[in-house]
Image (cartoon, grey):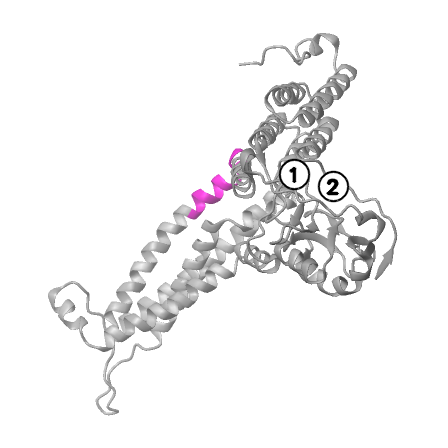
Amino acid sequence: MRRLGAVTAGHGPGGGLLYDASMTARVRQWLETLAGSYWFVPMLLGVAAVGLSFLTLQIDQDGRMERLIAAGFLTANGPDGARSLLSTVAGSIITVAGVIFSLTMVVLTQASNQFGPRLLVNFMHDRANQIVLGTFVATFVYSLLVLRVVRAGDVDLGVTEFVPHLSIGVALLLTFVNAALLVYFFHHTAEGVRVSHVLAGISRGIEQRIEKSTVPADEVAPAPEVPPGFRDDFAVLDAPVGGVLQSVDVEGLVELAREHDAVIRLLHMPGAFVWKRAPYAEVHPASAAGDVEDGLPGYLTLGEHRSLSQDLGFLFDELLEVAIRALSPSMNDPFTAMNCIDRITQGLLLLDGRHRPHDTHADEDGVARAVVPLQSRVHLTKHLFSELRVHVAADLLATARQLEALRTLVHEVSDPEQAHAAEEEFEALLTAARRSFPERDVASLPTELDAPRAS
């Protein structure tokens, strides 16, 4: 659906958060889905186990292992002993794999209850758990494939005895590897549910995403200018489907607009929810809306949940959710909330001095073709600390830490608008603290912006 009109659609000020437009949105989202699945890595290792079994069995069938057996490097097994050994390995391995899977589900449930369901994305992306589970599956598959070729000799039937000694040795080696991985899995699982470990992982993710998706201030090119007549002649497109805007294929969007000599402005940033049959894009000129309308959905990825690929704010919101849960009456854990405040402040400081390409994207001729709004540092600062203030203002320790964090931002960030936003949040939290705590407790708080920071 499209309609003509003048719809006010602003986008954030400078310092917004970047996305990576190096590959198409759908491929990028597909790769992220695979990275967060518990079936992909085990499937790859299972396929590798099939290939390994054919390789070792081929070597065994060539008869070259007899010399190693004679030299004592391999132990000779009879058919019955080989079957018993391989059956034991396969049965025990698949049993332990079931236990590992059950423990993983317990950890995911506990993480969802303690840290919030959004952090399940981080646990699902844990490569160590995927590899451990995949190794057990691969050993099970390998043992079964080797077991099927073991046979006893029968002179009357003309059947030659075949015991794949090398393959059995590899099965034993894989069993020892699985035993070591099992011990590692228990350690890794216990470490993975520690709140400090979880928060440090989110913080590392923020740092990596900032490094990948922003550039130093001196590398920012001038912003392309949107045609001045955009607001005089444009059409509004309504979304054909609804869902969370997970990613945008900016290069494809620019090419689509260039093909029809148009300018496309999205009304939602990655991470926002797009309502079905509600405005989600504007097209200039209005005469190009019909051509753009059919192709536009192919460059946007809508899903059921927010994604890490282009939505840096999602990682900050994970820290926000943990902090709010920690300050709830049921948990009453101000120290975790303080840790979250430290991590949020660290992320905002890392963003300072880093910039992203402008919201407006031009084609190869320098003509503005697409506008994709992104969350700005100012908006992010206001959003995080205003949400925290409601819950922090009831706890003295958390209030002191947030005031100190805001005072640090006021003095350290180079963006005047962000510093002003931090100053406003400082004053708002201080006002809330004066209503919540006795005067002698308020006296212990950092109440002056220009006061020396605590060591």
Q: Is residue 385 above or below residue 76?
A: above
Percent x, y for residue 388? 70, 29
Q: Is residue 126 above or below residue 171?
A: above
Query: Where does label 1 land, which residue?
Result: 16
Amino acid type assigned to the residue bearing label 2 in the image: His
Question: 364 left or right of 186?
Answer: right
Q: From this viewpoint, is residue 76 visible?
A: yes
Identify the element where label 2 is drawn.
loop
Q: Which of marks 2 and 1 is nearer the N terminus?
A: 2
Q: Residue 11: which disc?
A: 2
Q: In this view, does 198 lie above or below 417?
A: below
Residue 381 appears in which quarter of the rendering? top right
Magenta residues (range): 185-197
Q: Is residue 214 magenta?
A: no
Question: 426 left or right of 166?
Answer: right
Distance Cα–Cα, label 2 vs label 1: 9 Å
